[in-house]
Image (cartoon, rainbow, N blue to C red):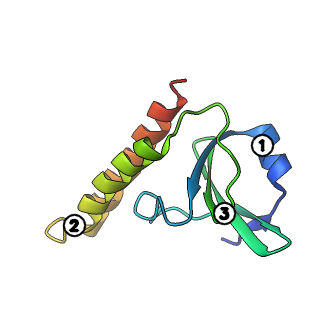
Amino acid sequence: MNKIKTSKSEMKDNYYIISSGYCSMQYLLRYESPVAYSSGVYGWSCDYYDINGVVISTGYSPINSKNTNASYELIKKYELKASKIENDYTTDYKVRQKKIKRLLLKLIQESKEV
């Protein structure tokens, strides 16, 4: 699927948002596809992933979190768990994919508990 170009202000106005830096959620988002992106004067700024109505903004210049409390520490905790799952090659690919998706959903749920 192709991602569409959108503005940061449009995304801020319409969604719950979790913000993360470039590659800080590479394992958690490994099996997801971005739905949109934003760019600025220096080029690409961030990608947006829509996960059950919550937007995850990740990139060099992601938009700030809104109505969530997804701290760096919380994201890092879940990313570490996802990394261990993804690198466990004794587990089937589809099983790893499902486990990581569940972790991502848990992160979203925990971050919405404002």
Residue sitting nearer the eye, 96 or 85: 85
Residue 2: x and y in percent read 70, 72
Q: CA distance from mark 1 to mark 3?
A: 13 Å
Tell me if 43 is positioned left or right of 100 in this view.
Answer: right
Which of labels 3 and 2 is toward the front?
A: 3
Residue in view at x 28 percent, y 68 percent: 93
Q: CA distance from mark 3 to mark 2?
A: 29 Å
Which label belongs to residue 12?
1
Q: Amino acid at mark 1?
A: Lys
Residue 86: x and y in percent read 29, 65
- Quadrant location of residue 17? top right
* Residue that mark 3 sits on: 47
Label 3 crowd (10 A; few <14 / some 14-19 / many >=20):
many
Number of labelled discs?
3
Residue 38: x and y in percent read 77, 63
Query: Which quarter shows the C terminus?
Result: top right
Label 2 crowd (10 A; few <14 / some 14-19 / many >=20):
few
Q: Specify which label sits upstream in the sequence, 1 or 2.
A: 1
User: Decide: marks 1, 3 in contact (CB < 8 A)?
Assistant: no
Tell me if 25 is positioned left or right of 53 in this view.
Answer: left
Q: Amino acid at mark 3?
A: Asp
User: Decide: marks 3, 2 in contact (CB < 8 A)?
Assistant: no
Which label belongs to residue 92?
2
Q: Specify which label sits upstream in the sequence, 1 or 3.
A: 1
Residue in view at x 80 percent, y 53 percent: 8
Residue 64 vertical placement versus 85 (above, below): above
